[in-house]
Amino acid sequence: MEELQHPLKGLQSHLVTLQCPLISLQHPLNGVQSHLVALQRPLISLQHPLVALQHPLIFLQNGLFTLQREMTPLQKSLFTRDEGQCSRNSSGFHLQ
């Protein structure tokens, strides 16, 4: 048993030696964590108005898609009508 006890004591002293720098690192990390938590609060408070804006923007987007869909046939008919009234020669377009 004593043969095992001596290497275990050496291992324990190495672990204690390693533990000291880790403990010294823990304090600044706690400070960083508190700063991150402090930063998180305003971001969360910003999230609510952004979510609230999302619904009117989706509504507006749907309206624009509908308008675009209704404008496409009108655009096509104007283009074909204009095409019928214009002829192209080397100097450009001229009304007939």
Image (cartoon, rainbow, N blue to C red):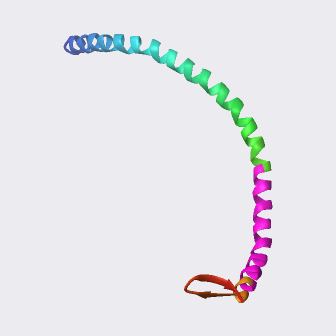
Tell me: residue 70, above or below residue 95: above
Across and down, in percent, residue 16 comes to: 32, 10
Q: Is residue 60 magenta?
A: yes
Residue with the most extreme front position: 91
Instruction: Name the chief secondary structure element in magenta.
Output: helix
Tell me: residue 6, above or below residue 38: above
Could you tell me which quadrant the N terminus lies in? top left
Could you tell me which quadrant the C terminus lies in? bottom right
Report whether 51 appears left or right of 88.
Answer: right
Front position in the image: 76 or 50 = 76
Across and down, in percent, residue 3 comes to: 19, 14
Give the residue drawn at x 80%, y 49%.
56
Across and down, in percent, residue 29 comes to: 47, 18
Report whether 28 appears left or right of 86.
Answer: left
Give the residue drawn at x 56%, y 23%.
36
Across and down, in percent, residue 31 comes to: 51, 15
Q: Is residue 29 magenta?
A: no
Residue 10 position by quadrant: top left
Magenta range is 57-81
